[in-house]
Structure formats: structure tokens, C-alpha cells
Amino acid sequence: MYFTDRGIEELEQRRGNEEVTFEWLAEQLRTFVDLNPDFEVPVERLATWLARLDEEDDDV
């Protein structure tokens, strides 16, 4: 288990039954980066990865 799994597990336990839109998620990510500018690059990478999940990629 990676250390980050703890946060993911907490998210799933606390909010796993909720439904959200990508618009809502994008706003939360923007707010997070505004409050934590050091995380701009990782959040950008996560957002890009999520946006491109349906693209076929031989490297995945």
C-alpha cells in the first residue's frame, strides 16, 4: 500500500456514495491549487490523466 492510499481510502469511505460532476471536481481542484500552489504540477498531471482516460494508449 502506498502512503497516498490512506487519503484515497478516506475519500472513498467518507464520500464514496456521493455523485459529483466533473465541473464540481474541476472547481475543487482549482481551489486546492489556489490554497496549495506547490501542488500545481501534480494536480495538473492528475487532471490531464483523468481527461485522457478514454484515449487508447499502448504505453498504459
Image (cartoon, helix red, strand yellow):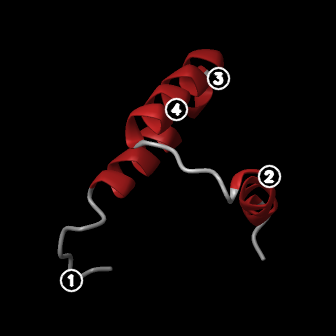
Along the line of sight, the residue nearer the viewer: 48 or 41: 48
Residue in front for this viewpoint, 20 or 5: 20
Give the CA separation, mark 4 to mark 1.
Answer: 28 Å
* Quadrant of residue 60 within the rendered picture: bottom left
**Secondary structure beneath label 3:** loop
Instruction: Residue at 49%, 38% (x, y): give it.
Output: 25
Label 1 belongs to which residue?
Answer: 58
Numbered disc 4: secondary structure: helix
x and y, in percent, of residue 13 in the image: 80, 60
Quick one: label 4 or label 3, which is nearer the N terminus?
4
Disc 2 marks a residue whose amino acid type is Arg
Circle 1 packing at 10 Å, graded few (<14), some (14-19), many (20+), is: few
- The circle drawn on residue 9 is none
Residue 6 in view, yes or no: yes
Where residue 14 is drawn, which disc sits there? 2
- Camera-side mark, 4 or 3: 4
Q: Which residue is mark 4?
A: 29
